[in-house]
Structure formats: C-alpha cells, structure tokens
C-alpha cells in the first residue's frame, strides 16, 4: 500500500462582520485550479511550512491570498482530505476582526477576492457552485456550530 505523506495545511473562513450577526459577510477566493480545469470558489488555504503551527499558517495564508489580517483565529476542526491515500490533514479556522492590508500572491496563483453574504455562500454549496471539499467543510461547520476556542493570536 502506498501512502503519500503530507506536511499538513490550514484553511480559514474569514468573516468581514460578526459571524453571529443578522447577515454575516465572508471573504471567498475564486482561484484558477489547473487540476479542476477552471476557477473554483475556496476559502484561503495553504500548506504549512516546516515548523509552522497550524494557526500561523492560517494567518499567513489569509494575508497572502486576501491581504487581510485577523484579530482573532479560532480552530473549527481538523479534517483528513483523502485518507485513502494520504495522511494530509487540514486545520480549519474562523477569522474575525479583519483589517485590510496588501496581499502577496505566489507567481502561480491567479485569484480574485470576493466578499459576499455568508447566506449566499451556503446557497452556492447547495447549488454545487462551491464544490471544494475544505471550503464546504469549513463553511458548513461554521454555519452549524459557530465559532470555537480562540487559537493563539497571529
């Protein structure tokens, strides 16, 4: 049996407004993915660097891909991506208290940042417009269970 070893990753559900408010607003990215053959709606995410903590990775990816920094990160859940052939785990966080700054994309990243009502993103899951697993897991977890215990501040 072959197993692909992976350093792990983090992803973040970034809330522009109070997640418990009447119409919470989030940030999604619309990124070109070669393997998918087109654009995919996703939450910001990326691979952890050597020695990097999951919350550090989440904070870094949020800044790199959206330009926003978070006052607070909260761990939602850690999931296996594809346990049939890899040990990769993604740590899913929520981010609140966002402050806008400058993003720093990698050369092979082609993406747009799209603010939207949280309710719209949930409808996009139902319609199949959002079909990325980590994004579905993060959004549905946040919608179902709300926030979680605060992680170390970024």
Image (cartoon, grey):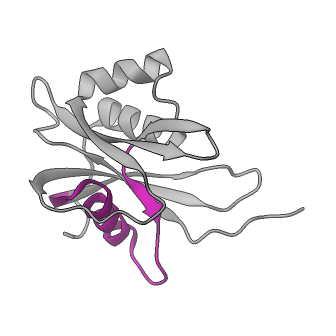
Q: Along the horizontal axis of the image, is 41 left or right of 5?
A: left
Total labels drawn? 0
Name the one closer to the observer, 62 or 107.
Answer: 107
Name the one closer to the observer, 71 or 146.
Answer: 71
- The answer to whether 48 is drawn above or below residue 94 in the figure is below
Q: Position of residue 110 (x, y in %)?
A: 42, 51
Q: Position of residue 130 (x, y in %)?
A: 46, 29
Quadrant where the C terminus is found in the figure: bottom left
Q: Along the horizontal axis of the image, is 13 left or right of 153?
A: right
In reply to whether residue 87 is colored magenta, the answer given is no
Q: Quadrant of the rendered structure where residue 147 is? A: top left
Q: At 57% from the left edge and 72% from the top edge, which residue is drawn?
A: 7
Q: Position of residue 92 (x, y in %)?
A: 40, 52
Q: At 46% from the left edge and 77% from the top edge, which residue is drawn?
A: 49
Quadrant where the N terminus is found in the figure: bottom right
Q: At 50% from the left edge and 21% from the top edge, which residue is drawn?
A: 128
Q: At 49% from the left edge and 82% from the top edge, which residue is drawn?
A: 50
In reply to whether residue 57 is colored magenta, the answer given is yes
Q: Quadrant of the rendered structure where residue 21 is? A: top left
Q: Position of residue 141 (x, y in %)?
A: 38, 37
- Tell me where the magenta segment starts and ends, as one range: 43-72
Name the one closer to the observer, 41 or 50.
Answer: 41
Q: Along the horizontal axis of the image, is 30 left or right of 90?
A: left
Q: Quadrant of the rendered structure where residue 85 is? A: bottom right
- The answer to whether 70 is drawn above or below residue 137 in the figure is below
């Amino acid at each position: 049996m072959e197993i692909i070893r992976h350093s792990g990753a983090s992803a973040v559900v970034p809330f522009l407004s109070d997640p418990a408010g009447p119409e919470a607003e989030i940030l999604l990215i619309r990124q070109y993915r070669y393997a998918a053959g087109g654009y995919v709606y996703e939450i910001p995410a990326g691979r952890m660097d050597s020695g990097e903590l999951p919350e550090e990775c989440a904070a870094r990816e949020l800044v790199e891909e959206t330009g926003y920094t978070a006052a607070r990160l909260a761990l939602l859940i850690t999931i296996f991506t594809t346990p049939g052939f890899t040990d990769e785990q993604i740590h899913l966080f929520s981010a609140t208290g966002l402050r806008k700054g400058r993003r720093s994309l990698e050369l092979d990243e082609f993406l747009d940042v799209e603010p939207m009502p949280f309710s719209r993103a949930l409808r996009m899951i139902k319609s199949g417009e959002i079909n990325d697993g980590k994004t579905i897991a993060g959004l549905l977890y946040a919608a179902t269970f709300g926030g979680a215990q605060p992680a170390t501040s970024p």
